[in-house]
Image: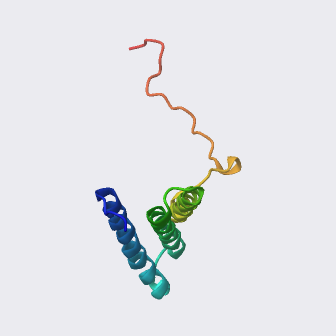
């Protein structure tokens, strides 16, 4: 029998919290996907939470391993995809052909020192 340590209990609480958060995030997006704006963004972030949950449970059960590092890397990439999906409508890359020409400078002063 293993002894319950504060760190182990904290890891268990972390895994449970992530599991509940994942379920609360995934269920409405999947169930009511027709009513959700940016469904792809939510699914990317939900996938990141699920992968972080899997990593937390893996650490809790088996300790640190390469598998945990891969899960965290995949979670960060899923979060990147979800965030990019949210940001896509707000990001525009200017195309050189579409750039307007700068307006000619109109000075307020005639110059020459005349009064």
Q: Position of residue 93 (x, y in %)?
A: 61, 52
Depth order, front residue of 87/113? 87
**Residue shown at the point (44%, 28%) measured from the top left:** 108
Q: How is the image coloured?
A: rainbow
Depth order, front residue of 102/98? 98
Q: Residue furthest top?
A: 113
Q: Residue furthest front?
A: 1
Q: Position of residue 1 (x, y in %)?
A: 37, 68
Above or below residue 30? Residue 57 is above
The number of callouts visible is 0
Relative to 77, is 56 on the left or the right? left
Q: Quadrant of residue 2?
A: bottom left
Q: Residue furthest left?
A: 6
**Residue shown at the point (31%, 63%) measured from the top left:** 4
Q: Position of residue 17 (x, y in %)?
A: 35, 69
Above or below residue 92? Residue 113 is above
**Residue shown at the point (42%, 13%) measured from the top left:** 114
Q: Position of residue 10 (x, y in %)?
A: 32, 61
Quadrant assignment for the C terminus:
top left
Depth order, front residue of 46/91? 46
Above or below residue 92? Residue 55 is below
**Residue shown at the point (71%, 49%) measured from the top left:** 97
Depth order, front residue of 10/35? 10
Q: Quadrant of residue 84?
A: bottom right
């Amino acid at each position: 029998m293993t002894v319950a340590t504060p760190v182990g209990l904290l890891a268990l609480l972390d895994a449970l919290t992530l599991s509940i958060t994942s379920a609360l995030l995934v269920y409405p997006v999947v169930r009511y996907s027709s009513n959700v704006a940016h469904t792809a963004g939510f699914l990317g972030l939900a996938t990141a939470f699920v992968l972080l949950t899997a990593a937390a449970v893996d650490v809790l059960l088996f300790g640190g391993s390469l598998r945990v590092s891969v899960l965290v890397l995949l979670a960060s990439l899923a979060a990147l995809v979800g965030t990019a999906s949210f940001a896509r409508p707000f990001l525009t890359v200017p195309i050189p052909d579409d750039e307007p020409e700068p307006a000619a400078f109109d000075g307020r002063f005639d110059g020459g020192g005349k009064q």
